[in-house]
Amino acid sequence: MKTYAGTGRRKTSVAQIRLISGTGNVLVNRQPIEEYFTVETYRRDALLPLELTKTNGQFDVFVTVRGGGKSGQAGAVRLGVARALVDYNEELRGALRPAGVLTRDPRMVERKKYGQKKARKRFQFSKR
């Protein structure tokens, strides 16, 4: 039984994915995906590459995800699953690339600047 691996990152989240041929069980940090990602949108986003390539019931997916919030973690899982599928079969790249799931989203939180409230918001200016 061959294992296919992929790593995904998004914002400050890192997800490590293992695909093993099976029945379609998905475990995230040793919990069923329904328990970990309680929002349906996050579950759909995380498993989008499996739907795009029509490999939904072929693999058991084991996910370890750390850092960030649920949205960033779902994005990291999506990239990791897509990379693992390409590791499984290079021809699936043609279905995944146009959907944009193989692209690492480079957007990160901008750092807070000194003398300001946040990264761009400033303290109220008073002329007098």
Image (tube, grey):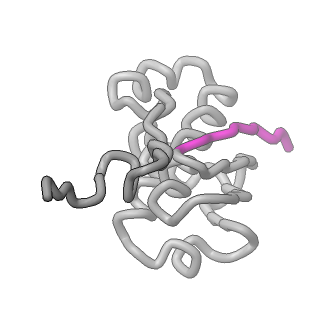
Question: Is residue 5 found inside the magenta-colored segment of the image?
Answer: yes
Q: Nearer the viewer, residue 1 or 105?
A: 105
- Residue 6 is situated, as x and y percent measured from the top left of the image, at 69, 37
Residue 76 place in picture, x, y as percent: 56, 47
Q: Quadrant of the C terminus?
A: bottom left
Secondary structure mostly seen in magenta is: strand
Image spot of residue 117 (x, y percent): 38, 58
Split into 4 quadrants, where in the image is the N terminus?
top right
Q: Residue at the right extreme? A: 1
User: Left or right: 43 with respect to 81?
Assistant: left
In which quadrant of the rendered view does residue 53 lie? Answer: top left
- At horizontal 64% and vertical 65% (from top left) the residue drawn is 25
User: Image point 22% across, 60% down: which residue?
Assistant: 124
Could you tell me residue 80's position as x and y percent? 61, 41
Span highlighted in magenta in the image: 1-10
| Rendered image quadrant of residue 2 | top right
> Tag count in the figure?
0
